Amino acid sequence: QVQLQESGPGLVKPSETLALTCTMSGGTISNYYWSWIRQPPGKGLEWIGHIYFSGTTTYNPSLKSRVTISVDTSKNEFSLKLRSVTAADTAVYYCARVIIAARPAYYSYVMDVWGQGTTVTVSS
Amino acid sequence: DIQMTQSPSSLSASVGDRVTITCQASEDISNYLNWYQQKPGKAPKLLIYDASELETGVPSRFSGTGSGTDFTFTINNLQPEDIATYYCQQYDYLPLFTFGPGTTVDIK
C-alpha cells in the first residue's frame, strides 16, 4: 500500500525559501505524476504543481515564478521549494500521487493517494 | 484559466436526506472532473473520477453526473460520517488542476 509522508520545517521566515520533501513508500515512483497541494487556514485547496517521474514539471501559473519541484527516484522522494514566502503562504501542504488512466480518447488524472499534510507557518 | 464554482458553499441536512452539490466550469471540460471529500483535520479523499465513476471502496450512496460545464454530486441517505467539505476538481491535458471552492456539509 502506497504511503506518502511530508517533512520539512514548520516555521519559515518571510522572504526566505520554504522547502518540503515527500517520501513515498510501498510502491514505485515510476509512471506517475507527484503533486503538491496546499490549504491556507480555513480555506480551500490550491494545486501548486507536480512532477512526472521522468522530471517533467507543470506548475500553477499563479505560483510558477516562485516554485520548483524536483524528484529523486533513487530515494523515492520528491521535493517542493517555494521562494520569497510571505504570510499568505502559511498553509497545510499536502503531497499526492496522480494516477494516469488511459481512456479511449483521452487520459484521466486523479489524486488517489495523499500524505497527511504538514503545517507551514510563515512568520518572523 | 478555467474557473470552477460550487454551490451551495455550505448546507445542513438531516440523516437520511439526499444532498446535492453543483459544480460549474467556466468553459467546457468534458468529463475531466473529480470529486473529493475532506473531513476536518484530514487529507482529501477521492470519491468520484471522470465525473461519474465511483472510486473503489467508496459507498454507493455517493454519485456524480454531468459533462461539459455543469456537474452534480449527490449523497443519497446522508450519514453522520459524511460530515465533510466536498471539492470538485477539474484537469486539462497538461495536466493542470483547479479545485472548486468547496461545499461544507453538516447535520441538522
Image (spheres, coloured by chain):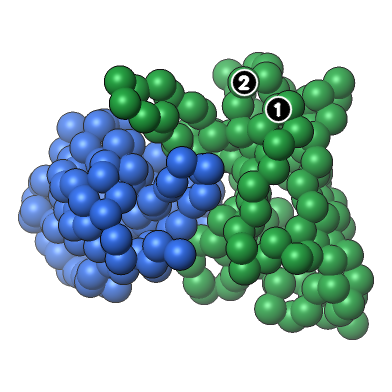
Residue A55 or residue B87, whichever sits in front: A55
Identity of the amino acid at label 2? Asn
Q: Quadrant of residue B39?
A: bottom left
Query: Image quadrant for the N terminus of chain A?
Result: top right
Identity of the amino acid at label 1? Phe
Check the image and report above or below for A44 versus A93. below
Among the chains, which one is blue? B
Which residue corresponds to mark 1? A53
Residue A90 left/right relative to A124: left
**Residue A84, horizontal then vertical, whole percent:** 85, 73
Residue sitting at 53 percent across and 43 percent down? B94
Look at the numbered discs 1 and 2 and tell me whether their residues touch, using CB distance below 8 Å: yes
Residue sitting at 73 percent across and 27 percent down? A54
**Residue A61, horizontal then vertical, whole percent:** 61, 63
Q: Earlier in the sequence, mark 1 or mark 2?
A: 2
**Residue A21, horizontal then vertical, whole percent:** 80, 44
Which chain's residue wears label 1? A
Figure colour of chain A = green
Q: Crowding at label 2, few (<14), some or many (≥20) Cα neighbours within 10 Å?
A: few
Query: Image quadrant for the C terminus of chain A?
Result: bottom right
Residue sitting at 56 percent across and 56 percent down? A47
Residue B84 left/right relative to A63: left
Check the image and report above or below for B5 versus A71. below
**Circle count:** 2
Instruction: Kindly tell me whether residue A80 is visible in this rendering.
Output: yes
Which chain's residue wears label 2? A
Which residue corresponds to mark 2? A31
What kind of element bears circle 2?
Answer: loop
Q: Are marks 1 and 2 on the same chain?
A: yes
